[in-house]
Amino acid sequence: MPRKTLLAALLVFVLPCSLVWAASPDSVVVERGVKIPMRDGTVLQADIYRPKEGGRFPVLLQRTPYNKAGGSGFGYRGAGEGYVVIIQDVRGRYTSEGEWYTFKYESEDGFDTVEWAAALPYSNGKVGMFGGSYVGVTQMLAAIAHPPHLAGICPVVTASNYHSNWTYQGGAFEQWFNESWTSGLAQDTLNRVVTANTNALGGAWKLPLTSYPLFNTQENALKLDSASVLAPYFLDWLAHPDYDEYWKKLAIEEHYADITVPSLSVAAWYDIFQGGSLLNYQGLTAHAGTDAARKGQHLLVAIGGHSGSGQKIGDVDFGPEAAKFLEDDVTLDWYNFLFKGAANRFSGKPVTLFVMGENKWRDEDSWPLARARTTKYFLHSGKGANSARGDGSLSTEMPHSETADHYVYDPSNPTPTVGGPLCCDAVHLPAGPRDQRPVEARNDVLVYSTAPFGKDVEVTGPVSLDLYVKSSAVDTDFTAKLVDVWPNGFAQNLTEGILRARYRDSQEKPELMTPGQDYKLTVDLWSTSNVFKQGHSLRLEVSSSNFPRFDRNLNTGSSATSSSRSIPATNTVLHDAEHPSALLLPVVP
């Protein structure tokens, strides 16, 4: 993919700053390339936008790996509304010194930057952070370090655990995201390595020519700083498939009690970090207790996130209400409410959701909704549920004596990814809601559907699947997808999940299966909010791959990290009285 195309795709969401200025540039003072020393002597650079008028103002800070130059639109707008806006390149990115390694330095560097910003002569000592994706990482990891002057955060579509809802999901490697995101980041790293090589050699290129940094490996790299490869963290991710200490020390979920400031968590139904964003709100709310500083947690759930924004996302037009979500407006409203006491959208209930199907925003008292009732939709079939041509069905009636469904999962011919929560290359793999009928035509996809609903049915909250299975392999994957089938046949994906069978009991201690033995699995499909309109049907797809979103399970017990040998697996889904496989849905009365 051409460099400019890939970077443009990558930056569509992670640099969300509007280019609309709310103030004349003449009323804003801009300082570019301001040097900020960290505790170890590494110097990071930032651009500062502040009101020209004298006085002290609250600070809005963004720490980004995506180039601080992209923040000018929000910088001018925020300064025009009475804030000091600071956009900083994180360590090892663009103008900042040091080594770029995901997650590693964000707590200490975040702490040091917040305190530096609070001490500026035009700061009133109150600092809030904002931004999405990895920029949410920089907020969460700074917050757990307790910088005294951090007074609020606004993490948008970001994870709660960099193992289980960033790099892996259900034990499967997020291959499309990990490779596309890392590829985009690697360009700046390559530029820095080339410059470092050239400077270290007095401006002359090193011989032999195979030492050119593009071809560096861990073994032959010219080591300047600690950059031995363009993305050493990617290799480390592959080396740590289990949830071990490499991940635990940085997992936000392990540190909710350490975050003591109000947070606006912004999630999105079709976002790749939806699960983590919702868990962040739940975790922070659960630890609020009676501590006034911890209170004030808010949640806003939009539609697309990394999958897009606006009225039309993917193949679906969500109506004019969808277009009202503008991230810059939300950010400024949050801090006007938090820092200036403004009465606005955050003055009322703490949770705001976009309800699909109805295509309206709705305020709620909590997440998940207390009034939602967990309803089991059991899997049924007679002759077989293979593809949409089969007779798979869903109903609230318990199964009795039914024949199991079988399919062959062949890693050399995996079920393809069609839409869904993806990042960061929409040109080659479109994201969001897409018609699933091409997937449902495959015999290695089991399809279970309700009859068309006679009235509207709302599903809002966490979705999961209890699945009784067996396999001819020692390890395989099981995928699940919730779909809204329109009267015209359009099959709109809503939410999805995956479970690598070896992780059925623990993400820390994988255990292979015994071929032919029955197992009960629970597949987490994350959450949704959708009204299945009268005449629509609710559908479940079950398969064993969703590629290239997730890496393919080879069915051998070996990892695709180190092996390329695969074998087909015959996978079985049981649904009878002793094995009541069921989709668990939060139905709102």
Image (cartoon, rainbow, N blue to C red):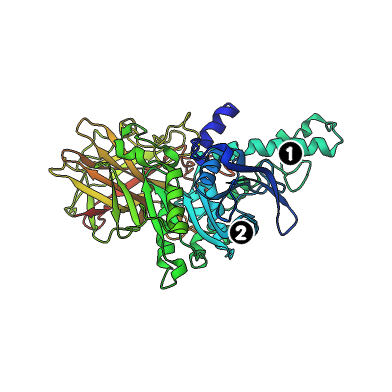
For image coordinates 71% across by 40% down, the residue present is: 217
Image x and y of residue 212, in percent: 76, 32
Image x and y of residue 42, in percent: 73, 52
Q: Are marks 1 and 2 in contact (CB under 8 Å)?
A: no
Image x and y of residue 536, in percent: 19, 39
Q: Most extreme residue toward the bottom, as rendered?
A: 290
Classify mark 2: helix, strand or loop: helix
Q: Quadrant of residue 264?
A: bottom left
Q: Is residue 95 above or below residue 487?
A: below
* Marks 1/2: CA–CA distance: 34 Å
Q: Most extreme residue toward the front, as rendered?
A: 53
Q: Which residue is mark 1?
A: 193
Q: Is residue 406 visible?
A: yes
Q: Is residue 513 visible?
A: no
Quarter in which the N terminus is drawn: top right
Q: Quadrant of residue 8?
A: top right
Q: Depth check: 339 or 14 in front? A: 339
Disc marking residue 118: 2
For image coordinates 14% across by 44% down, the residue present is: 455
Q: Is residue 537 above or below residue 265?
A: above
Q: Depth check: 103 or 22 in front? A: 22
Q: Depth check: 139 or 252 in front? A: 139
